[in-house]
Image: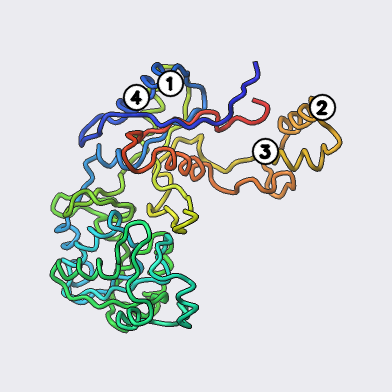
């Protein structure tokens, strides 16, 4: 019988994960128990995805603010440091900032405006227009910012991040000066020791700073990229991708996940005979239409994945075929014609007009975004996602 359902994304409930748990076994058991409970079967090329958070928890990859402070002090000198381009987030950056401030005598905090890298606004574009401010060239002091724009609270959290971050730095024992600018070179007028906190543009920012005469330059990926006094770490990403755990501790991005995804894949094959694909996912990409905030606070969407998830989709656009190549057909004749075109499609459709409008993104980014939206970040209790039918097409 012809299948009548395409892609299905299911959140899989799991036990609360603790450090030292056998995560592969927990994930496999949870998926198979859900299949038995809900009456579905696994198929070849199903995708099992686990959020990075439970992987880091199982690994015990945590660090305290003291470890952050010590690493910042050692790498940036412990005097006046510039902290530039942070995102505005209590969960993602506040505890990191506390540790950073503990490792310096003064922090010159340079905030991007009108919004941070992931879309959190400090001011609106309309406010800039009304004030005649050009964010690409104008550098604002805190006093000038307040004079022009007053207090601006985040629309979702109600936090004035300018005051919140300033107070946090002072409470950590450092002096603070705040400026608003988008050219990283501006920080060098205040200090030659700079910590750049941008995520996806960090390599360019570090290059610009070094070429402009900075003496010491680090990114968040350079802080805690090795253990400090037995702390957790991430060799590749450092503090990037970390989340608040407690008021004095962060959970870091997970390490060395490839063995985990291969282990889950093998256990499923051994127990069901089905060869599934597996990934560990971070933030997907979704822009909120009201707050205009992207997720993308993690340094990558796929932390690790099995080989079958590599590449990009190779798909034809059904509505293009129906409206152009087969515009004179309908009913079964149209269905048969499109089915034959799909079965005979080239292995690489790049540049083919019939593929226009299909999403030009990596498979891992697409599936990771689907998983991130399915799992949510609150109390759903579904840190594992099972995606079925993703690799099907109209002929399946």
Q: Name the residue under label 4.
A: 30
Tag 2 near tag 4, CB within 8 Å: no
Is residue 320 rendered to the left or right of residue 277?
right
**SS state under label 3:** loop
How many discs appear?
A: 4
Q: How far apart are marks 2 and 4 (CA)?
A: 44 Å
Task: Determine the residue positioned at 42% across, 42% down.
Answer: 372
Give how far apart the Cα atoms at labels 1 and 2 are.
40 Å
Which numbered dot is residue 167? none
User: Quadrant where the N terminus lies?
Assistant: top right
Q: Which of marks 1 and 2 is in front?
A: 2
Q: Residue 306: x and y, percent?
A: 45, 35
Query: Residue 4's image quarter?
Result: top right
Near mark 1 (Cα within 10 A), the count class, few <14, some 14-19 or many ≥20, is some
Position of 47 with respect to 321 (left or right) is: left
Q: Distance between the residues labelled 4 and 3?
A: 36 Å
Q: Position of residue 321 (x, y in %)?
A: 76, 39
Residue 333 badge: 2
Residue 70 image position (x, y, % from top left): 16, 62
Residue 347: which disc? 3
Q: Mark 1 points at which residue?
A: 269
- Label 2 Cα crowd, 10 Å radius (few <14 / some 14-19 / many 20+): few
Mark 4 Cα shell of 10 Å, populated few (<14), some (14-19), many (≥20):
some
């Amino acid at each position: 019988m012809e299948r009548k359902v395409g892609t299905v994304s299911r959140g899989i409930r799991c036990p609360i994960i603790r450090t030292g748990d056998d995560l592969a076994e927990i994930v496999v058991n949870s998926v198979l128990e859900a299949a038995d409970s809900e009456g579905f079967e696994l198929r070849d090329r199903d995708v099992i995805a686990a959020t990075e958070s439970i992987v880091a928890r199982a690994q015990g990859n945590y660090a305290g603010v003291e470890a952050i402070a010590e690493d910042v002090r050692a790498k940036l000198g412990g005097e006046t440091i510039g902290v530039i381009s942070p995102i505005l987030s209590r969960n993602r950056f506040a505890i990191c900032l506390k540790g950073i401030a503990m490792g310096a005598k003064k922090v010159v905090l340079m905030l991007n405006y009108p919004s941070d890298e992931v879309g959190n606004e400090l001011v609106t574009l309309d406010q800039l227009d009304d004030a005649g401010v050009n964010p690409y060239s104008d550098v604002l002091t805190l006093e000038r910012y307040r004079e022009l724009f007053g207090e601006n609270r985040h629309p979702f959290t109600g936090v004035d991040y300018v005051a919140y971050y300033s107070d946090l730095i002072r409470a950590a024992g450092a002096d603070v000066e705040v400026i608003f600018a988008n050219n990283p070179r501006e920080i060098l007028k205040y200090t030659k020791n700079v910590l750049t906190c941008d995520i996806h543009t960090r390599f360019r920012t570090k290059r610009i700073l070094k070429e402009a005469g900075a003496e010491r330059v680090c990114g968040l990926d350079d802080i805690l990229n090795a253990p400090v006094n037995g702390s957790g770490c991430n060799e590749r990403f450092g503090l990037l991708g970390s989340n608040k755990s407690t008021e004095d501790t962060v959970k870091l991005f997970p390490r060395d996940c490839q063995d985990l995804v291969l282990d889950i894949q093998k256990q499923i094959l051994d127990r069901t005979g089905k060869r599934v694909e597996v990934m560990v996912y971070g933030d997907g990409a979704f822009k909120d239409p009201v707050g205009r905030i992207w997720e993308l606070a993690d340094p990558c969407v796929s932390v690790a994945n099995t080989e079958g998830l590599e590449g990009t989709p190779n798909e034809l656009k059904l509505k293009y075929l129906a409206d152009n190549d087969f515009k004179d057909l309908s009913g079964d004749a149209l269905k048969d014609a499109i089915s034959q075109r799909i079965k005979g499609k080239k292995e690489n459709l790049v540049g083919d007009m019939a593929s226009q409008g299909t999403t030009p993104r990596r498979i891992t980014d697409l599936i990771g975004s689907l998983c991130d939206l399915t799992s949510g970040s609150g109390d759903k209790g579904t840190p594992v996602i099972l995606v079925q039918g993703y690799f099907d097409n109209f002929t399946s």
